[in-house]
Image (cartoon, helix red, strand yellow):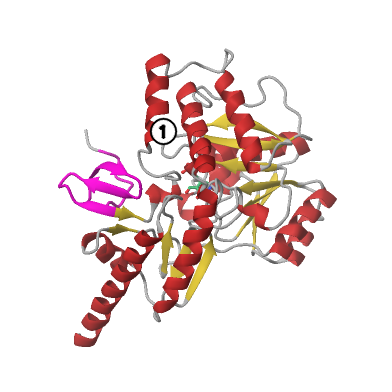
């Protein structure tokens, strides 16, 4: 049997990893400034995380949501405290798309409505309602397109109010900082108007923090830079440092009832231990402080490179734009310099999503490598 061929792959086979580095099957070490798509939060194979998961697996890997699982409560309490979101309730699932699917479903239950407002260039995942709220017709099948979704420009309060004032909107879903779309984000004034207008017209505000959450922006959730209080917050990626776990935080004013949401695997013992371990390490190693420190260092050092047009994003969720497509640059960074970076829907943007534990020396190594690759690209343009 062959694999269903949906992923364009780089010819690299990582076999082991530690901290900010992965090592391939030929023994070559790479600096990981991509974190497996923003997933690695506390660093690859962190020793506390490995020990916690190994010990749990020896005791029990899985049981369903039909029994008491105190690990879920421990996770909810730690998460509430560290994120300062204690007036929410936690529902656990397995991925980012599933988190948003449940968030949209809850908004629809809570309002009795079905229309969704999303934003241009949004990416919310590939399940039915989540992909319908994703601004990419190529990945929407006819089945998904039956959802009623309106895409609006970011930072356009007038068009938002016009749509919300029809009073038929269940939810507005927005990324704290757009990931796949290319690091665009709402201004503080826009987020504050969004919150106010959602309240005024009875729509549920869903903050997709799947990529921008868990400390990546320098605050636990990126919406906390804007002083707002969403109704539902979706999480995944950094939450399990590679163990598949996602979840939604649902504001106290939205009521639960038995059977309303559910999943077989969500919140299983291993997933909870992975997520608890991530929170413990974020706290113990003060990783949010590290994000702010390393981010400032990055922003300072990147100024040394004149070819850069702009730097977007916050914390360690950054995008560096050039006036040429970065596909070749990314390849050279991997194969010549041993550095993984990310791409996005914007072909000219290089995405930086390192583990939150990345060190300033590792950023220095990247800056020197970037200078050297840019020089070689420049030389080859001149000689052609
Ligand atoms: C902002 C955002 N939402 C949702 C998702 C979907 O998450 P998953 O791939 O875990 O389903 C992603 C994945 O890249 C994302 O970046």
Q: Quadrant of the C terminus?
A: bottom left
How far across and down, in percent of the image, does residue 317 sit?
49, 58
In the depicted structure, whether residue 326 falls above or below residue 245? below
In the depicted structure, whether residue 44 falls above or below residue 55? below
How far across and down, in percent of the image, does residue 22 sit?
28, 47
Q: Quadrant of the N terminus?
A: top left
Residues 143 and 337: in front is 337
Instruction: State the residue at coordinates (42%, 21%).
Output: 56
Instruction: State the residue at coordinates (35%, 69%).
Output: 367
Instruction: Answer whether residue 212 is magenta in the image.
Output: no
- Magenta stretch in the rendered image: 3-30
Q: Residue furthest top?
A: 67
Q: Residue furthest bottom?
A: 382
Would you name the residue on which mark 1 appears?
A: 48
Instruction: State the residue at coordinates (60%, 42%).
Output: 234
In the depicted structure, whether residue 208 falls above or below residue 303? above
Instruction: Answer whether residue 28 is magenta in the image.
Output: yes
On the picture, is 382 further left or further right than 42?
left
Q: Label 1: state its secondary structure.
A: helix
Q: Quadrant of residue 329?
A: bottom left
Q: Residue furthest right?
A: 200
What is the crowding at mark 1: few (fewer than 14 residues within 10 Å), some, or many (at least 20)?
A: some
What secondary structure is the stretch in magenta mostly built from? loop
Instruction: State the residue at coordinates (25%, 66%).
Output: 332
In the depicted structure, whether residue 64 falls above or below residue 340? above
How far across and down, in percent of the image, does residue 195 sit?
76, 53
Q: Quadrant of residue 249?
A: top right
How far across and down, in percent of the image, does residue 246 sit?
53, 36
Would residue 127 be seen by someone viewing this image from the given angle? Answer: no
Residues 328 and 69: in front is 69
Residues 290 and 134: in front is 290
């Amino acid at each position: 049997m062959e694999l269903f061929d949906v992923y364009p792959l780089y010819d690299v086979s990582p076999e082991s990893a530690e901290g900010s580095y992965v090592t391939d099957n030929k023994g070559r070490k790479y600096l990981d400034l991509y974190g497996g798509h923003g997933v690695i939060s506390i660093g690859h194979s962190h020793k506390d995380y490995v020990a916690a998961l190994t010990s749990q697996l020896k005791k029990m890997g899985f049981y369903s949501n039909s029994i008491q699982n105190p690990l879920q409560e421990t996770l909810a309490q730690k998460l509430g405290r560290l994120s300062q979101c204690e007036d929410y309730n936690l529902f656990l699932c397995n991925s980012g798309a599933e988190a948003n699917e449940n968030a949209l479903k809850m908004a629809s239950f809570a309002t009795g409505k079905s229309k969704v407002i999303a934003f241009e260039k949004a990416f919310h995942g590939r399940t039915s309602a989540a992909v319908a709220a994703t601004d990419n017709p190529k990945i929407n099948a006819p089945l998904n397109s039956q959802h009623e979704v309106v895409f609006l420009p970011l930072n356009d309060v007038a068009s938002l109010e016009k749509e919300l004032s029809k009073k038929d909107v269940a939810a507005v879903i927005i990324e704290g900082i757009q990931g796949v779309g290319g690091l665009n984000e709402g201004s503080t004034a826009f987020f504050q108007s969004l919150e106010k207008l959602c309240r005024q017209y009875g729509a549920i505000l869903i903050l997709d923090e799947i990529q921008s959450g868990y400390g990546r922006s320098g605050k636990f959730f990126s919406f906390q830079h804007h002083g707002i209080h969403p109704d539902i917050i979706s999480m995944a990626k950094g939450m399990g440092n590679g163990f598949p776990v996602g979840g939604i935080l649902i504001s106290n004013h939205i009521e639960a009832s038995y059977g309303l949401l559910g999943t077989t695997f969500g919140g299983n013992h291993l997933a909870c231990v992975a997520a608890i371990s991530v929170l413990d390490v974020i706290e113990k190693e003060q990783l949010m402080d590290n994000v702010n420190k390393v981010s400032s260092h990055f922003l300072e050092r990147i100024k040394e490179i004149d070819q850069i047009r702009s730097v977007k994003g916050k914390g360690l969720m950054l995008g560096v734009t050039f006036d040429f497509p970065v596909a070749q640059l990314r390849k050279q960074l991997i194969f010549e310099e041993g550095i993984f970076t990310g791409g996005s829907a914007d072909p000219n943007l290089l995405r930086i999503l390192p583990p939150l534990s990345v060190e300033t020396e590792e950023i220095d190594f990247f800056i020197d490598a970037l200078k050297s690759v840019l020089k070689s690209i420049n030389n080859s343009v001149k000689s052609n």
